[in-house]
Amino acid sequence: IVELGPLRSQCINLAHLNLANCLIPEERLSGLFGSGISLKTINLKGCKQVSSKFVSRMAKYSPLLNKAILDECVNITEDGLRPLLANCPYLQRVAFTGVTNVTDSAIISAVQSQGLRHLKEINLSGCKQLTDAAIFSIAANCALLNDLSLSGCSQISPAPIREIANNCHTLRTLNVLGCKRIQPDILPYLTQHCKVLERVVGITIPTDSTPR
């Protein structure tokens, strides 16, 4: 795609947009909004040119957005994350893999403002700034969560994961690969409280290699 003008003028009912890995100048992307288009899903994976200004504008004009894939959008800062998470109350799936600017404060402010109450899936893999505080907040406010990925979030301890198990009873998938503080002894707690849990990634159960 080189020119997005026809979308703006002829596709005012456009609801789903996949621009993954497209190197479109941000000014052309921004022109989509403010002309009647209100997206429900957007995939900007790998669009490293996208800034917080664009994400903020997208959130303003797409209040019905329910899926936002922003993996590897490394230029997005808290200035873009806050309005996206707080102003799109119908978000069900968000992905920020590798967006290292995701912070505790952005997550906490969003969930405390009821911005993520419909959230079912969140991928925070590689968001290395996150601490237990953000996950506690998700646990307390996102009861519908069924897929949580924290791969590479090395600061996370077992405590907020237990809170996820206590409050998110529909959890089906948990990815804690690279979360070195989370050990196999948490598995019984997870299976006891998450009755529909199907998959846990990143916890290796040690085998007994003692000779018999």
Image: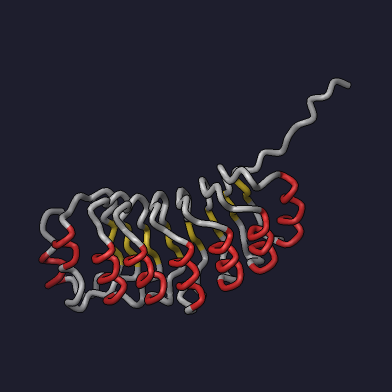
In this view, the residue in front, 175 or 135, is 135
Quadrant in which residue 158 is drawn: bottom right
Tell me residue 115's x, y (percent).
45, 75
The way the protein has been coloured in the rendering is secondary structure
Looking at the image, is 26 positioned above or below residue 92? above
Specify whether 37 is left or right of 101: left
Residue appearing at x 66%, y 66% in the figure: 169
Looking at the image, is 24 positioned above or below residue 202? below
Looking at the image, is 166 positioned above or below residue 43? below
Residue appearing at x 43%, y 75% in the figure: 90
In this view, the residue in front, 163 or 3, is 163
Residue appearing at x 37%, y 76% in the figure: 87
Residue furthest right in the image: 212
Specify whether 172 is left or right of 78: right
Specify whether 143 is left or right of 117: right
Q: How many marks?
A: 0
Residue appearing at x 10%, y 65% in the figure: 5
Tell me residue 53's x, y (percent).
24, 66
In this view, the residue in front, 169 or 210, is 210
Tell me residue 80's x, y (percent).
32, 66
Specify whether 140 is left or right of 79: right
Q: Quadrant of the C terminus?
A: top right
Quadrant in which residue 194 is drawn: bottom right
